[in-house]
Image: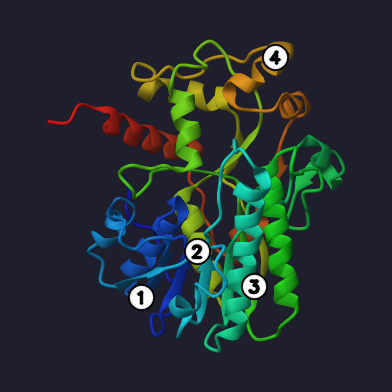
Amino acid sequence: MDTRVDLGDLPVDTSAPVLVTGATGYVAGWIVKSLLDAGATVHAAVRDPHNTDKVQHLLADASPGTLRLFASDLLQDGSYREAMQDCRIVIHTASPFARTVRDPQRDLVDPAVRGTRNVLETATEVASVERVVLTSSMAAMVGDAQDIRRLPGRIVTEETWNTTSSLTHEPYSYSKTLAEREAWRIARSQDRWRLVTVNPGLVIGPSLNPDPTSESFAIARQMASGEARFGAPRIALAVVDVREVAYAHLAAAFLPEAEGRHLVVAETTDIVDLGRRLLPAYGATFGLPRRAVPKPLAVALAPVIGLPRAYVRRNIGFDLRSDTTKSRRELGVRYRPAQESMEEMLGQLAASAAPKR
């Protein structure tokens, strides 16, 4: 596994600490490691600094930078103030990612929106802050095929906004849309710091945490479980490697001219296509998807794979195209193939499932 993000000649400023919220997360872990590799001091905001299961992989890093842990809570006003002191850059990654929740308002929308408001309003109060990088999502740009049908050329760009998601239809996408809109509202209300957003597709690739719990790994485990061995719905997935997402955040943070939104996607695929491409390496290890199921059957079986029937009905067989010119040209992101990312991801799952000696 490639455990370093190639920063090239990216001008990482190590003269002031950098705040990373949600620092134990899948994407955030790579951001933190990259900053530490560059020699920066990282103020890592986490819910519980004393939870060794969550923070050990951060503490174990032997990079030349300095790591400081701070307790924080998305729903507690002012809880990021101490961690933000003296920081010029704030990278806000903390936000829940789950497809199945009991209460979408409580479990998704409130933490995403109130947490974003909490962090950005604190940034307005802390005089040292010059730039805020927000981890948004492609989900804030497009909810489902209904959004895509109205786009010029049916291509997703930085100008695109999700208009179809709600508390009852794709609530995760709804939470990301509301949170990013709130971020831009707050950014426009002041003139001291600049907001830049990174909007990745589904993030794939290896985790620095040896026991990853992210929704991305939940999807990978489901894909490898054998549940879809005899067929899966062909629903388009825009995917991107976690290391490219981490690089995009640092470029958004440190490149002087970085501004606005950045769609970060390596390629569009689907579960069936990925499964077939992974068969040579992992066909004997995992029960990977090998064929597509007909649309009527896919709609009927949607709840079994954790998807609403309405979402499957709208999106199965529908193409998803995106224009990533801005992330390539202005941030300098270079994308690796999805197959490479998934092979490393499944390799990590295989290693964790192997008997311990």
| Label 2 residue SS | loop
Instruction: Characterize the local packing of mark 1: few (<14), some (14-19) or many (20 or more) Cα atoms within 10 angstroms.
Output: many
The quarter in which the C terminus is drawn is: top left
Q: Residue 317, percent across and down?
A: 72, 24
Query: Which label number is shown at residue 51?
Result: none
Q: Is residue 321 above or below residue 301?
A: below
Question: Marks 2 and 3, how far apart in space?
Answer: 21 Å
**330 vs 81, nearest the viewer:** 81
Residue designated by label 1? 40
Q: Amino acid at mark 4?
A: Ala
Q: Is residue 144 above or below residue 97?
A: above
Residue designated by label 3? 195
Instruction: Characterize the local packing of mark 4: few (<14), some (14-19) or many (20 or more) Cα atoms within 10 angstroms.
Output: few
Q: Residue 253, percent across and down?
A: 53, 72
Q: Is residue 233 visible?
A: no
Q: Amino acid at mark 1?
A: Ala
Residue designated by label 2? 73
Nearer-N-terminus badge (4/1): 1
Task: Specify the quadrant of the image occupied by residue 256.
Answer: bottom right
Nearer-N-terminus badge (2/1): 1
Question: Marks 2 and 1, how far apart in space?
Answer: 24 Å
Question: Marks 4 and 1, how far apart in space?
Answer: 51 Å
Residue designated by label 4? 300
The answer to the question of whether label 4 and label 2 lie on touching residues, with beta carbons closer than 8 A, is: no
Residue at x 70% of width, y 39% of height: 170
Question: Marks 3 and 1, how far apart in space?
Answer: 21 Å
Q: Is residue 289 visible?
A: yes
**273 vs 171, nearest the viewer:** 171
| Label 1 residue SS | loop
Q: Is residue 302 left or right of residue 55?
A: right
